């Protein structure tokens, strides 16, 4: 009886500490190479390798299918990293046998800063399409090989299955809606401080600086360890609280230059740290800076 | 070098000297490398004793002869200019770009003096398109194909297909005929080699294919977005993306995707070639843009072409100071009347 009480208390404490969204998941948002290695035989598991075809052909996690990053985040006109059209996305999921109840682990590489955040951009697109049990492999394929895990060169031909998931339309926010949210929602610029301050800018962004009122929560320099694995969740939580506060229900809008880097904080905030209303401004600074009437600071 | 490879690969069993020459008895690196040939397969005689047919065919293939580049520009020249071009430009410039056997099977080809080096530690490989084809064709074709240049990924890359899945060995090695242009080569890829019939439950799709067959190329509708166009190449090296529809210069009855040809009026001025017949051929060629997608703006809406006339070449959008022949490529789509 004493043990039962203690067990019940532990369950209640865990439920209070771990956010509801995380608890509802059938897979942790970030999985280790050890975890993946042990779960390769899980029938519900779909491992999606987002590296280029030729990289996949040279070696991949056994059983992984290959769907290159750009398929998940094509450019449209002059805007980079956009969502594919819903019917195209449905075709991709169907052709690769991914169902709404699949447990998908996204595997990328970590050679460059964009590589490190590609996995979360893909995870975001999967969640948008209605696949809820999505994880990213911590440290990517680089860590998988560094850990001496088995590598396969057998190309996996997925079994086609019509995708029937329900799309989550509320995960993204457009330029005009961002403008209306200034002073109401927490707008988070996830670029490095020099870009936030306007000291630097990328060529494809028309004006330097950040959206009026945005706070800075850098991504690439803040969230990764030296081996490109994520820093401990407690550390990430502390960074998040400092920037966006403790209110998990507060509306948060994240952006970067083109909607790729910001996906990392979008994913961590919503999927790992329990913030329930996190949206991505997909057009990001590339889109915002085009309209000279929209306010930019400093 | 991997000693296991030395033992297992018949190419290496006769020692380095059999291909690279040099002096195996040399005591120092300098002595050993005296007379060494860094790119032995530039001379096809190195490979031909064992690969007789492939070498003979390859000696006539466009990848080796580079004749396609010559044929592309000489219609702009007078007879005297063609002679000048052959003497001053072709051998030194175009021909320097030819691919040797080793460029595809041993060491990534050098582009602008830069090579990725040995493909797999001097192993002789059958193919590795990402390190070979992609390097020479990395300015336009390959990044378009993967989608890294912008826009979406070609549907064939999405399916895991690489270059040699469509461009067969016989096309790359040659079939023993000395072709002047790639248009003449037999066994080139055609969409209809695989897509023999249009299977669709949608009436609109079937009607669209029936209506446009023979009038619009597959690329005309199924190219998904902008591709690279060298507007001022060989001049300012500026490249801009674009999407251009117009009449196929090689088949005026067909509308297709066009790409700007990197030749302007003074491209060969340094060689003393004025291009006396510059206006005989257009500055656009039909292009098989490697950005194929099932659904595009044009497959989603007939109005894009028939009402908005989006991306069609017009008098206003023609290249400034371009060839007069460019005007013949303008096509104005008719409105749909029913």
Image (cartoon, coloured by chain):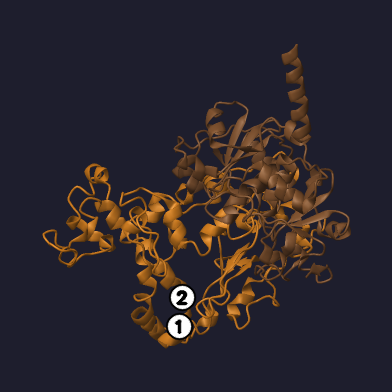
Q: Position of residue A153 (x, y in %)?
A: 44, 38
The residue positioned 66% from the left and 57% from the top of the image is A75
Q: Label 2, label 1: how many angstroms apart (C-alpha)?
A: 10 Å
The disc at residue B268 is 1
Chain in orange, by letter, is: B
The answer to which of B72 and B140 lies nearer the viewer is: B140
Q: Position of residue A114 (x, y in %)?
A: 60, 55
Q: Position of residue A188 (x, y in %)?
A: 76, 56
Q: Residue furthest toward the top?
A: A1
Q: Could you tell me which secondary element the residue under label 2 belongs to?
A: helix
The residue positioned 24% from the left and 52% from the top of the image is B52
* Circles 2, 1 touching at the beta carbon (< 8 Å): yes
The residue positioned 65% from the left and 56% from the top of the image is B224
Residue A267 showing in the rendered view: no
Q: Which residue is mark 2?
A: B73
Q: Nearer the viewer, mark 2 or mark 1?
A: 1
Q: Position of residue A256 (x, y in %)?
A: 71, 58
The answer to which of B153 and A227 lies nearer the viewer is: A227
The answer to which of A49 and B71 lies nearer the viewer is: A49
The answer to which of B269 and B247 lies nearer the viewer is: B269
Image quarter for residue B109? Answer: bottom left
Image quarter for residue B61? Answer: bottom left
Whether A254 is drawn above or below B66: the answer is above
Residue B329 showing in the rendered view: yes
Chain in brown, by letter, is: A
Q: Chain of mark 2?
A: B
């Amino acid at each position: 009886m004493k043990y039962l009480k203690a067990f019940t208390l532990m369950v209640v404490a865990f439920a209070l500490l771990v956010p509801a969204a995380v608890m509802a998941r059938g897979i942790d948002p970030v999985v280790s190479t050890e975890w993946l290695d042990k779960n390769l035989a899980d029938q519900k598991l779909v491992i999606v390798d987002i590296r280029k075809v030729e990289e996949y052909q040279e070696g991949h996690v056994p059983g992984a299918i290959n769907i290159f990053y750009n398929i998940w985040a094509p450019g449209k006109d002059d805007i980079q990293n956009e969502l594919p059209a819903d019917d195209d996305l449905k075709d991709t999921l169907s052709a690769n046998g991914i169902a709404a109840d699949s447990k998908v682990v996204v595997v990328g590489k970590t050679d460059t800063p964009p590589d490190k955040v590609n996995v979360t951009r893909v995870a975001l697109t999967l969640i948008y399409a209605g696949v809820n049990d999505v994880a990213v492999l911590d440290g990517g394929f680089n860590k998988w090989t560094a850990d001496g895990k088995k590598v396969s060169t057998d190309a996996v031909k997925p079994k086609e299955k019509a995708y029937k998931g329900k799309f989550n339309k509320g995960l993204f926010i457009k330029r005009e809606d961002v403008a209306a949210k200034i002073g109401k929602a927490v707008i988070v610029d996830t670029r490095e401080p020099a870009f936030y301050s306007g000291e630097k800018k990328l060529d494809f962004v028309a004006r330097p600086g950040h959206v009026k009122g945005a706070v800075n929560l850098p991504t690439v320099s803040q969230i990764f360890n030296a081996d490109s694995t994520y820093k401990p969740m407690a550390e990430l939580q502390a960074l998040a609280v400092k920037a966006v506060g403790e209110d998990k229900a507060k509306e948060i809008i994240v952006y970067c230059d083109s909607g790729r880097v910001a996906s990392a904080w979008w994913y961590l905030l919503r999927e790992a740290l329990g913030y329930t209303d996190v949206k991505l401004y997909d057009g990001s600074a590339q889109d915002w800076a085009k309209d000279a009437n929209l306010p930019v600071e400093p | 070098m991997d000693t296991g490879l030395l033992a297992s690969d018949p190419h290496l069993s006769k020692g380095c000297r059999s291909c690279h020459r040099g002096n195996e008895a040399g005591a120092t690196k300098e002595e050993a490398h005296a007379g060494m040939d860094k790119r032995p397969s530039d001379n096809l005689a190195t490979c031909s004793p064992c690969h007789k047919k492939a070498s003979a065919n390859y000696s006539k293939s466009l990848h080796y002869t580079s004749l396609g580049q010559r044929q592309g520009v000489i219609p702009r020249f007078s007879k005297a200019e063609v002679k000048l071009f052959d003497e001053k430009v072709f051998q030194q410039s175009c021909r320097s770009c030819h691919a040797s056997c080793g460029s595809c099977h041993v060491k990534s080809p050098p582009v602008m003096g830069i090579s990725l080096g040995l493909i797999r530690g001097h192993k002789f490989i059958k193919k590795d398109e990402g390190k070979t084809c992609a390097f020479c064709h990395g300015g336009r074709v390959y990044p378009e194909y993967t989608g890294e240049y912008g826009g979406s990924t070609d549907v064939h890359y999405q399916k895991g297909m690489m270059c040699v899945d469509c461009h067969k060995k016989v096309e790359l090695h040659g079939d023993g005929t000395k072709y002047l242009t790639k248009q003449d080569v037999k066994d080139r890829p055609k969409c209809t080699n695989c897509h023999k019939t249009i299977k669709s439950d949608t009436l609109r799709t079937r009607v669209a294919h029936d209506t446009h067959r023979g009038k619009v190329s597959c690329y005309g509708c199924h190219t998904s977005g902008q591709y690279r166009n060298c507007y001022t190449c060989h001049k300012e090296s500026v490249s801009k993306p674009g999407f251009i529809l117009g009449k196929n210069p090689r088949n005026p009855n067909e509308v297709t995707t066009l790409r700007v040809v990197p030749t302007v009026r003074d491209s060969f001025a340094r060689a003393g070639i004025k291009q006396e017949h510059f206006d005989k051929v257009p500055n656009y060629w039909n292009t098989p843009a490697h950005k194929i997608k099932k659904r595009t703006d044009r497959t989603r809406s007939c109005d894009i072409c028939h009402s908005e006339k989006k991306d069609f070449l017009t008098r206003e959008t023609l290249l400034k100071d371009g060839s007069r022949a460019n005007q013949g490529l303008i096509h104005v789509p008719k409105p749909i009347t029913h």
